[in-house]
């Protein structure tokens, strides 16, 4: 039987994304982004719809490119899974939908129970979030007269640092672009911010009860943005749903540390 601490750690692992210093993950994302951006420019030229009028189509050609992206997302999700032998393979298959023949993953199994998403569902959500993100960058980039390579370079620059960007913020303010987040890092890591925040709030509440804690302390880490860093060291009663987060970057990078009282 998995204890509460192991349960939370496994769920966090299943929904975490590999650090972007990891060359393989970085290359996979860059390749998928380039493919979609190049196709986006080709389609925009064909339809003569640029900038704010641009939108990915639903043709077979587009589906082919998205299938490639989905295949890459599956690589990333698979790379994050931790093999184990504590849960039966039949049970895992029923919940994950797809697992390797020779091993399977406890973390993904727990995540599917905790969040209601199977392996395939998570891959599909990552793919959709990635598509929306690239579409937004193409829209803004074309409005700014950027080339496809220029947009790719800009996108990869912002991948690891999702702090405020003038082009994206101005686009949102103008109502031109519907963003799922300000960077692929957030989009990949959070299937969507509301579900993840609520999910971790539920998980943390169980952990706090288990630890008999009455307060929590916000503690920043290397990924915490400037705004959320201001919460570092602040104490919150455990009856609050979540530690306050700001909406511009969907930042939930403030780790929770239980404090028995």
Image (cartoon, grey):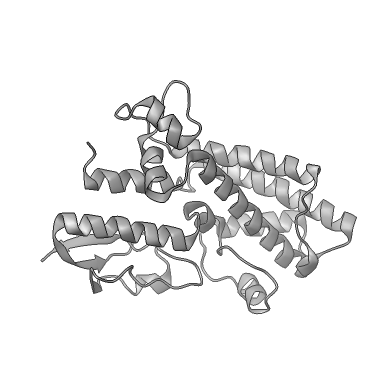
Please state the horizontal and vertical placement of residue 26, each as a whole percent of the image. 55, 45
- Which is more toward the observer, 116 or 196? 116
Residue drawn at the location 68% of the way across and 54% of the way down: 152
- Which is more toward the observer, 206 or 223? 206
> Can residue 223 be seen here?
no
Q: Is residue 77 above or below residue 183?
A: above
Please state the horizontal and vertical placement of residue 196, each as a whole percent of the image. 42, 58
Residue drawn at the location 76% of the way across and 60% of the way down: 55
Q: Is 248 situated left or right of 256 in this image?
A: right
Residue drawn at the location 58% of the way across and 45% of the way down: 124
Q: Is 196 situated left or right of 48 in this image?
A: left
Q: Residue furthest top?
A: 102
Q: Is residue 59 above or below residue 209?
A: above
Please state the horizontal and vertical placement of residue 83, each as a whole percent of the image. 37, 30
Q: Residue furthest bottom?
A: 173
- Quarter of the picture holding the N terminus: top left
- Quarter of the picture holding the C terminus: bottom left
Residue drawn at the location 59% of the way across and 58% of the way down: 157
Q: Is 185 situated left or right of 200 in this image?
A: right
- Which is more toward the observer, 165 or 206? 206
User: Disc count in the image?
Assistant: 0
> Can residue 174 be seen here?
yes
Q: Quadrant of residue 102?
A: top left
Q: Quadrant of residue 239?
A: bottom left
Please state the horizontal and vertical placement of residue 199, each as a whole percent of the image. 38, 57
């Amino acid at each position: 039987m998995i204890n509460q601490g192991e349960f939370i750690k496994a769920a966090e692992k299943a929904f975490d994304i590999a650090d972007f210093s990891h060359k393989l993950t970085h290359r996979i994302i860059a390749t998928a982004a380039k493919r979609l951006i190049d196709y986006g420019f080709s389609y925009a030229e064909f339809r003569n719809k640029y900038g704010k009028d641009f939108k990915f189509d639903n043709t077979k050609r587009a589906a082919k490119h998205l299938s490639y992206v989905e295949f890459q997302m599956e690589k990333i999700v698979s790379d994050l899974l931790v093999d184990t032998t504590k849960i039966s393979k039949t049970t895992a298959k029923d919940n994950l939908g797809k697992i390797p023949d020779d091993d399977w993953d406890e973390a993904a199994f727990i995540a599917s129970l905790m969040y209601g998403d199977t392996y395939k569902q998570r891959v599909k959500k990552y793919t959709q979030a990635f598509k929306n993100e690239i579409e937004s960058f193409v829209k803004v980039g074309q409005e700014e007269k950027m080339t496809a390579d220029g947009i790719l370079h800009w996108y990869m620059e912002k991948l690891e640092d999702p702090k405020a960007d003038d082009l994206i913020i101005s686009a949102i303010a103008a109502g031109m672009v519907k963003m799922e987040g300000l960077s692929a890092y957030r989009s990949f890591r959070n299937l969507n911010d509301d579900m993840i925040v609520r999910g971790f709030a539920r998980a943390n509440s169980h952990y706090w009860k288990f630890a008999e804690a009455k307060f929590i302390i916000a503690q920043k880490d290397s990924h915490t943005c400037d705004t959320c860093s201001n919460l570092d060291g602040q104490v919150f009663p455990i009856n609050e749903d979540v530690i306050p987060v700001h909406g511009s970057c969907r930042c939930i990078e403030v780790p929770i540390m239980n404090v028995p009282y």
